[in-house]
Image: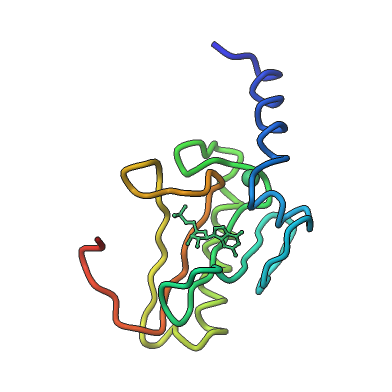
Amino acid sequence: MRSVRSIRAGAEALRGHCPFCLIVEGEASADVVHSSDRVLAFRDTNPQAPVHILLIPKEHVTSVRELGEGQASMLVELLRAATHLARAEGIDQHGWRLVTNVGADAGQSVPHLHFHLLGGRRMRWPPG
Ligand code: 5GP
Ligand code: ZN
């Protein structure tokens, strides 16, 4: 079993290379639409809908699989930010979707927890 110190060292090493950590650190640019102490939201560079925003914790967490009890309040804050942004983007009345991919089968391509806020068009179900 890995020690807390070795897990922290691994997270720090990843932090230098994770594209979303680079955005949090201000070392990569992004079209930021919301920022608080613990949550950041910015527009996806390859939008799949008229509104496509990514919401992330500023702390590096790989996916919901790695969430712990200490992150519960961050998660509530993130969900409230999504609701706020849906209203600000004018899609709250017609509807919107919040989705997070976990692992390879789901198509997760960035190993930093993110929720896709999608709206502005009719969504299909089930997703592809
Ligand atoms: P996933 O496939 O992991 O669920 O979603 C990753 C998303 O991040 C994709 O929709 C992709 O377009 C977006 N993305 C990847 N790299 C960047 C980046 O550097 N900046 C922004 N704004 N979006 C990114
Ligand atoms: Zn990261």
Which residue is drawn at the image coordinates 38% and 70% (left, top)? 97
| Image: 103 above or below 76 | above
Q: How is the image coloured?
A: rainbow
Which residue, as the protein is rendered here, is positioned at the far right?
Answer: 26
Image quarter (top left, top right, bottom left or bottom right) of the C terminus: bottom left
Count of marks placed on residues: 0
Which residue, as the protein is rendered here, is positioned at the far top?
Answer: 1
| Image: 94 above or below 126 | below
Q: Quadrant of residue 45?
A: bottom right
Left or right of residue 56, residue 15 in this image: right
- Residues 15 and 34: in front is 15
Q: Position of residue 70 (x, y in %)?
A: 61, 39
Q: Quadrant of residue 16?
A: top right
Q: Quadrant of residue 88?
A: bottom right
Q: Position of residue 120 (x, y in %)?
A: 41, 84
- Residues 118 and 92: in front is 118
Left or right of residue 41, residue 121 in this image: left
Q: Position of residue 127 (x, y in %)?
A: 25, 63
Q: In what quadrant does ligand 2 lie? A: top right
Left or right of residue 72, residue 18 in this image: right
Which residue is drawn at the image coordinates 66% and 61% (left, top)? 40
| Image: 115 above or below 17 | below
- Residues 57 and 49: in front is 49
Image quarter (top left, top right, bottom left or bottom right) of the N terminus: top right
Which residue is drawn at the image coordinates 67% and 45% (left, top)? 59
Q: Position of residue 43 (x, y in %)?
A: 58, 71
